[in-house]
Image (cartoon, rainbow, N blue to C red):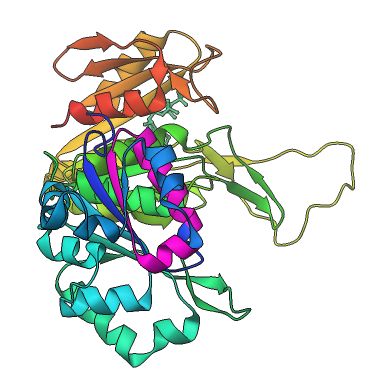
């Protein structure tokens, strides 16, 4: 399954806010992801941005109030509302949120919202004082009780010059949230997945650590693929520069010991654990309290083993039965399949993803990966070189 946004019909309502320009980017990105985007602008939105901007990026008509009374007459809003898989109001002004909360239908966008039966996502954008106002807050609560999903607003600089809560969320967050909404009803609905990702850092002193080249790309892609299929995802991540997909419960950790504790706790009621993290096998036996000084010519480090997390999980599973499925990765630079097979057995896994890290377009810090899946029942499947997102989907598909 690819991005669940593909082939979905999204009605994007754009209302009167200076943030309306960001809506063009959202319309463009949704279209690039394969959605059919019907934009409705309110009269005040048209003062900030033209319908033509939206038509240019969606390749479809952008609607304005004149269309309510125009050619297709009163059926326009029914057609738009009934065919929508999702209604997104971005930016949502205080005035438009008040109309949505109270069922007022005095323009094309508000009557379409009344006709629509699909999920509603609201992205507020207004001055901080307006968002905090009791009237707006009570409208927000009414809409939340009706299951509208709110994204933002965020803290930051506002058009008025004030700094406060009212900025519209960035398009990337909004797009990730839409993906989450569409994925929610997928085949893994309700199942808990724990995914580990990224490197660990083992402190030598207050400023230095031992780590590895993992960027977390493959693990974050696995978390996204699990969200796309409807599962509840807990992502236990070492330090990376990546943003967790919307809807994921992110537990940031630094050391192998912290990762061990978080994984044992979170996987104790999970359906699956997917262990993509590059966990340090050794850590300094002693963390120096103060910065180690140059001093002598040589410095010998004394290292001790960390816990093998998958082996600890296997022991936990023998007692409690959880996690029901365990997937490991084998990062190898030689004897790939032989080493992967022995890790599959030693760590009592259901599946191991064997990954040749010596190949230039596979492994750390690249967008692609070439892996072989080895299953506990002896089945073996070699996948082609492909994007890490596609590898992630293939792994999640084995658990459906
Ligand atoms: N792993 C783990 N705990 C560790 C080290 C690794 O659970 N302390 C997990 C990894 O997340 C991966 C699998 O075990 O899913 C295999 O990791 P890998 O680094 O390939 O192998 P190791 O078991 O560390 O063995 P070696 O480094 O000797 O190859």
From this view, report whether residue 396 is shown above or below residue 223. above
Whether residue 210 sits left or right of residue 78 in the image: it is right
Pinpoint residue 141: horizontal percent, then vertical percent: 23, 80
Image point (16%, 56%), residue name: 77
Q: What secondary structure prevails in the magenta region?
A: helix
Image point (14%, 40%), residue name: 324
**Is residue 261 visible in this depiction of the protein?**
no
Q: Is residue 38 magenta?
A: yes
Pinpoint residue 337: horizontal percent, then vertical percent: 35, 10
From this view, report whether residue 360 is shown above or below residue 151. above
Q: Depth check: 121 or 61 in front?
A: 61
Image point (31%, 17%), residue name: 342
Pinpoint residue 308: horizontal percent, then vertical percent: 38, 38
Q: Is residue 326 magenta?
A: no
Q: Range of the magenta residues?
A: 21-47
Ligand 1 falls in which quarter? top left
**Is residue 65 visible in this depiction of the protein?**
yes
Whether residue 154 sits left or right of residue 34 in the image: it is right
Q: Depth check: 395 or 90 in front?
A: 90
Pinpoint residue 82: horizontal percent, then vertical percent: 10, 51
Q: Residue furthest front?
A: 71
From this view, report whether residue 354 is shown above or below residue 39. above
Q: Quadrant of the N terminus?
A: top left
């Amino acid at each position: 399954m690819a991005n669940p946004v593909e082939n979905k019909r999204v009605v994007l309502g754009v209302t009167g806010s200076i943030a309306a320009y960001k809506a063009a980017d959202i319309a463009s990105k949704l279209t690039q992801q394969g959605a059919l985007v019907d934009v409705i602008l309110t009269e005040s939105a048209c003062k900030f941005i033209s319908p033509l901007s939206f038509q240019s990026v969606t390749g479809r008509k952008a609607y304005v109030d004149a269309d309510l009374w125009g050619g297709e007459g009163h059926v326009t809003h029914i057609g738009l509302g009934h065919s929508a898989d999702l209604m997104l109001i971005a930016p949502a002004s205080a005035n438009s949120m008040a109309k949505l909360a109270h069922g007022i239908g005095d323009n094309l966008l508000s009557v379409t919202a009344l006709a629509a039966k699909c999920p509603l996502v609201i992205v507020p954008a207004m001055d901080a004082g307006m968002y905090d106002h009791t009237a707006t807050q009570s409208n927000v609560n009414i809409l939340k009780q009706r299951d509208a999903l709110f994204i933002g607003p965020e803290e930051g600089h506002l058009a008025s010059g004030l700094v406060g809560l009212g900025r519209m969320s960035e398009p990337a967050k909004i797009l990730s949230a839409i993906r989450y909404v569409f994925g929610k009803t997928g085949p893994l609905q309700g199942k808990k997945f724990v995914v580990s990702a990224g490197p660990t850092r083992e402190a030598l002193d207050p400023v230095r650590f031992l780590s590895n080249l993992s960027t977390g790309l493959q693990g974050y892609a696995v978390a996204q693929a699990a969200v796309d299929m409807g599962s509840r995802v807990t992502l236990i991540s070492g330090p990376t520069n990546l943003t967790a997909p919307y809807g994921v419960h992110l537990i940031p950790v630094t050391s192998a010991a912290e990762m061990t504790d978080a994984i044992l706790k979170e996987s104790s009621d999970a359906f699956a654990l997917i262990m993509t993290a590059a966990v340090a096998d050794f850590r300094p036996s002693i963390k120096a309290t103060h910065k180690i000084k140059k001093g002598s010519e040589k410095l010998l480090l004394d290292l001790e083993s960390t816990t093998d997390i998958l082996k600890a999980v296997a022991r936990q599973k023998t007692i409690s039965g959880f996690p029901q499925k365990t997937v490991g990765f084998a990062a190898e630079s030689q004897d790939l399949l032989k080493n992967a097979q022995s890790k599959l057995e030693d760590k009592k896994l259901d599946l191991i993803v064997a990954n040749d890290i010596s190949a230039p377009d596979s492994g750390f810090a690249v967008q692609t990966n070439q892996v072989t899946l080895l299953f506990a029942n002896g089945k073996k499947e070699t996948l082609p070189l492909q994007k890490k997102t596609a590898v992630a989907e293939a792994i999640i598909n084995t658990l459906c």
